Amino acid sequence: MLKHMPKKGPSSERLVRVFRNGRNQAVRIPREFELPVEEAIMRKEGQRLIIEPAPAKSLRAVLAGLKPLRENFPRIPDSPADPVDL
């Protein structure tokens, strides 16, 4: 059974088990280290793996990724504007 490693400074460390998931190597992230996102960036620095939240996509990037609508909307005739008393 794996045990908690002692805390070091403001952050903490945990010994975790590495396992195979099909052709991939995986690790379970302990609850206290969960990332509050659905996507993350992983990079390797020497022997270390660094995992951090992926930056949020801009509205422009989200809109660019949308598929065009294929629905035919009915034509709406232009009506004259209602008079307004100022």
Image (cartoon, helix red, strand yellow):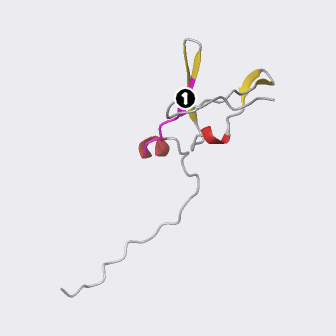
Q: Which residues are magenta?
A: 50-58
In the rendered view, would you say 45 is above or below 35?
above
Residue 63 in the figure: left or right of residue 84 = right
Which residue, as the protein is rendered here, is positioned at the far bottom? 85
- x%, y% of residue 14? 66, 30
Residue closer to the observer: 17 or 43: 17
In the rendered view, would you say 14 is above or below 36?
above
Residue underneath mark 1: 8
Which residue, as the protein is rendered here, is positioned at the far front? 6
Residue closer to the observer: 14 or 80: 14
In the rendered view, would you say 47 is above or below 84?
above
In the rendered view, would you say 65 is above or below 5?
below
> At x 21% / y 88%, what residue is drawn?
85
SS state under label 1: loop
Residue 17 in the figure: left or right of residue 10 = right
- x%, y% of residue 23? 78, 20
Which residue, as the protein is rendered here, is positioned at the far left? 86
> At x 49% / y 35%, what residue is drawn?
10
> At x 67% / y 35%, what residue is drawn?
29
Q: In which quadrant is the N terminus drawn? A: top right
Label 1: few (<14), some (14–19) or many (≥20) C-alpha neighbours in 10 Å: few
The tally of labels here is: 1
Write down the quadrant of residue 19 in the picture. Answer: top right
Residue 65 in the figure: left or right of residue 34 = left
- x%, y% of residue 58? 43, 42
Magenta segment: does it hold 54? yes
Q: In which quadrant is the C terminus drawn? A: bottom left
Magenta segment: does it hold 5? no
Residue closer to the observer: 55 or 81: 55
Write down the quadrant of residue 50 in the picture. Answer: top right
Q: Amino acid at mark 1?
A: Lys
